[in-house]
Each structure stands twice: as C-alpha cells, then as structure tokens.
Image (tube, rainbow, N blue to C red):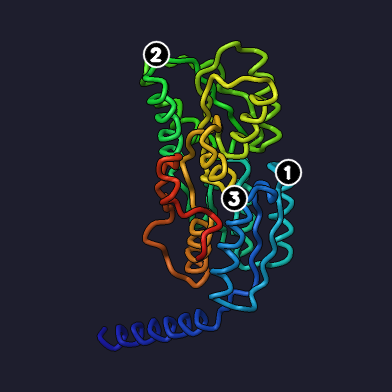
Amino acid sequence: MRILKTLVTSAAATALLATGALAQDKQLESIGISVGLLGNPFFVATIKGIEDRAKEINPDVQVTSVSADYDLNKQVSQIDNFIASGVDIIMLNAVDAAAIAPAVKRAQSAGIVVAAFDVSAPGADVTVMTDNVDAGRKACQHIVDALDGTGDVIIINGPQSSSIIDRVAGCQEVFEANEGINVLSDDQNGKASRDGGLNVMQGLLTRFDKIDGVFAINDPTAVGAALAARQLGRSEFIITGVDGAPVIEDELAKGDSLIKASASQDPYIMAGQALQMGYDVFMGETPEEDTVLLEPKLITSDNLGDYQGWTAAR
C-alpha cells in the first residue's frame, strides 16, 4: 500500500512537472479585440490599454482590433473569424448582454480564453468593468440634487449591452426614490453615439415643452443631446452622462455648458487589467475573482482640475 502510494505520488509529481513545463513553454502570440464602436474615444483607449499590457508580456504579440458597430451579427462573425485564425485570447466588448453567449461558448470550445471588458458577456472567463449601476446612480443623483428633488426628467437609453442596462437601472433607482421626479421618457435608443443622441433629443424636445434634467447613458450621447438643445434654442435643463471622456472635460471647462457632470471610467486601466487576467487564465491560473468592478467617480466643473482623464500620461 505504501509502495503504491509512492508510485502514485511520483506519477502525480511527474505530471505536475510536465504541466509546469508546458505552461512555461506557452507564449501569448495573438489577441483579437472586438469593441462596440471603434470611433468612440473610449474604445480607442481600451485598445491602447490592451496593446500596452500585451506588449509587456510579449513585444511580438499580434493584436487585431475590429469594430462591431453595435451590430450583434457583425460581432458574432468577428468572433468566428478570430476562432478560425486561432487567436489565444479574445478581448470582448459585447454589444448584447445575452445573445453573444453561443459565440463565447464556441470560442472557449476551441481553447480560446474570452476576457470581457466594459460590459459582461455570458460565460466569459474573466470580466473587468466599471460598476455601471453606481455610475448611473451618481450621474442621476446629481440631477436630483440640482433640481432639489422635483422636476421632469429624461433618460436617453442605448444599445442593450450590460453596461447600459446597468446604468439605466442605477439611474431609475435614484429617480424612483424621489417622489418629486417625473420621468418623461426612458426608452429612446440614442445608439450610444453623438448623432444618435442628437436625433433622439431633437424628437424629445419637440415632444416635451419643459424638461428639467437629462441622463445620457454615455458622453457621446450627452454631447449629441446638448447639440440638439442648442439647435432648437432650449436651455432650461441640465445633462449628465457616463464616461469622463475628453470631450466632457472640454464641456465642463466651459462653465456654460448644459452638461454638468459625468460618472467617469478609466478605459485604459480597465481593459489592460482584463487582458492581464485573461493572460493568467491562458497560462493555467485560476483567478481569485473572475469579475472585477471598478468604482466610478463623478466629474464636475468643481473637481475637474483633480481628474486624470483618458489622455493622461501613463
């Protein structure tokens, strides 16, 4: 019995040594990145965060970045292309909170690690994102405070990724907790873009004679909403958003912008951390936590000087 135990132990040790040797021989060679909209500076910063961290791991790593343009079918095709090309890790900014699940499963079945960032993706190996519920809460609490708890407000919604769903949920939680707040609209899709925010807000301004506050699910949407207000000569309301983008820094610095606050994110840190966690899984390590939420901070004209934005030196 003792001899058998020794033999088994020796075999196990040999297997562990072999596994360790294989792990040491593994090399991160290729990464595929699919983001919601490559034209958004937020995603430009995420890609830089991934690339910088990846180059630290292997200077010769091949990184391919593509834009899904918030089109589920397009993103599914991108994932299938990454599978066909045999990438080691897929960095995924899922454009749909649920329907992307089969594509994630196909990638994992092919031995590819899937690391989600900014939004969750069903079944992803690891996820790093802002606490988007809290971001929605903070941005909408700013509206409530500015209105002393009474007024007519609007939520400009967006594509149904998990981050946007969570931001709206956090905002609705705050508005519902204040009886004096009346939500005029919360289901219009501004497509998370400036043009989308512009088009939606033009319609809402035509529909409603008085608006006191607007929550936009991201900064490009907020900028579009502010542009619509200027075009139609409306200035009776304030706007808040989520991102802390460079364009919002400019808006807050003006002093006379309708945009008064944004719950900030750090896309560079977020995506780089997701890549590192994905790499750890690729190397055979099990993360202590597979999901990490980063705390957002509300940026206003009052604290803008202390804000380290997306373009700050790293």
Residue 60 lies in quadrant:
bottom right
- Asked if one can make out residue 70 in the rendered structure from this viewpoint, the answer is yes
Which percent across, then down, holds residue 215?
52, 29
- The residue at the far top in this view is 209
Tag count in the figure?
3
Q: Amino acid at mark 2?
A: Gly
Q: Is residue 104 above or below residue 228?
A: below
Of 203 and 304, the residue lying toward us: 304
* Residue at 45% across, 25% down: 172
Task: Identify residue for label 2.
Answer: 180
Which percent across, then down, holds residue 240?
51, 32
Task: Identify residue for label 3.
Answer: 42
Dot 2 surroundings within 10 Å: few (below 14), some, or many (20 or more)?
A: some
In the rendered structure, the answer to whether residue 105 lies left or right of residue 150 reads: right
Q: Amino acid at mark 3?
A: Phe
Secondary structure under tag 1 reads: helix
* Residue at 53% across, 45% down: 249
- The residue at the far front in this view is 255
Which percent across, then down, holds residue 237?
53, 22
- Asked if one can make out residue 98 in the rendered structure from this viewpoint, the answer is no
Dot 1 surroundings within 10 Å: few (below 14), some, or many (20 or more)?
A: few
Secondary structure under tag 2 reads: loop
Of 142 and 72, the residue lying toward us: 142
Task: Identify residue for label 1.
Answer: 73
Of circles 3 and 1, which is in front? 3
* Residue at 74% across, 58% down: 81
Which percent across, then down, holds residue 254?
54, 39
